[in-house]
Amino acid sequence: MGSKERFVGVLKFELTNTLSLPCLFYQIHGEAIRRWQREGLPKDVHVIEHLGLERAELMPVDVGPMPHYERGRLEEIEEWRLSMDRDFKAKISEEITVVEEQPPIRQPSDWEWFKRLLNPQSPARYPRFWDDYKRVVSERTYALGIYVGSPLSWLIEWLSVRGFSEALNSNRQWLDELIEWLSNFVVETTRRAVSDITIDFAMFMEGRAYRAVAAVGSDVICSLVRKSYEMIVSHLHQHGIRLIIMHAGGNVAPLIPMWLDVGINALAPIQASAGMDVISLRKTYGKDLALIGGIDREALAGSKRDVADEVLLKVPSLLNDGGYIPAPDGVVQANVAWENMCYYLELLHHIAET
């Protein structure tokens, strides 16, 4: 069985007691790798391969602003550079300095220039040698997916949380129009990819969804973005893509019912540190929702007993059910020892083999 069959079979609940370890959900900080090299990881190996993780990729289709909106350069010298993605304004008094974020879209008129960066027909959105790419991936043995946007997180990033909240209260119609425009942009940008290549999964990325929920509540968020998800998911279904993953950190539990209703059927990375628990989610949603992640990074940074307690509490029952890929609940940091990382992976293989 190849890694593609394991990945798809597990997340579709077609395979049980099967371990899939796609590298797509194992992000490792550079400082962690440097620590591991001091503690025994060879320096002349591919870390992902050495750990036994499996290939899984998103297609190289650029779904987002192009070119990226201008960055304000703060400082640059020969050895390093400091820059930022948005403008900031500092208000200085004798007692305190207040730094205010100035997002690229501060009022509806800004949208007129910004949306020029979202032309779905921009040639550089696809690799130059697209025909060669199609030929190569048609023979692949690994799982291949496509990123299908971040409708909610884009609004939070481009308007800021404050601007987003204010627009909800004062100009909701404009927000509705904006998100509909973004949905059409995603559909048109990805149409060529999903038409040309048989794809295994699609992935939304809503890294700021939890902030939106905290700011205005889940009911408001669901009423705003539901149609957007429905439009994009319908587009995917028309091209045979049924495995749709929501990659969203933080506590996003209030949004899960809406995501399920529109056809999103897998969730990652399920952050234990944010109060998300994979066991509770499985009890609540059963086989309607595949789960990815949920292994507390802080447990991996503790003792071997901490690692074992965390893994044995969650992994055996979930692997037995199917629909679960064990992975850390975020980027693995330098506080995780090389010995612990190896022990964690050994435990996973032992559980799957017994």
Image: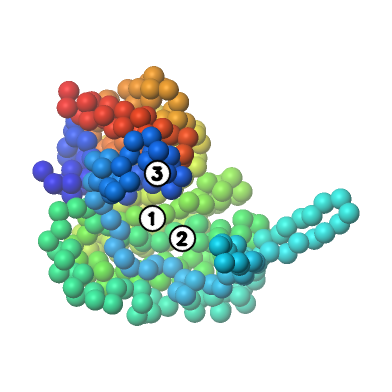
254 or 88, nearer to the observer: 88
Three-letter code for the amino acid on which mark 3 is drawn:
Ile
The nearer-to-camera label among 1 and 3 is 3
The nearer-to-camera label among 3 and 2 is 3
The residue at the point 35 percent across, 44 percent down is 26
Dot placed on the residue nearer the N-terminal end, 3 or 2: 3
Q: Quadrant of residue 22?
A: top left
| Residue denoted by label 3 | 33
Which numbered disc covers residue 204?
1
The residue at the point 73 percent across, 64 percent down is 89
Tag 3: Cα neighbours inside 10 Å, few (<14), some, or many (≥20)?
A: many
Which element is circle 3 on?
helix
Dot placed on the residue nearer the N-terminal end, 1 or 3: 3
Labelled pair 1, 3 in contact (Cβ < 8 Å) = no
Q: Is residue 172 visible?
A: no
Which element is circle 2 on?
helix
Residue 180 position (above or below residue 57): below
In the rendered picture of this protein, how many numbered marks are placed on residues?
3
Q: CA distance from mark 3 to mark 2?
A: 33 Å
Labelled pair 1, 2 in contact (Cβ < 8 Å) = yes
Q: Measured from the top left, where is residue 27 in percent x and y?
A: 38, 46
Which numbered disc covers residue 261?
none
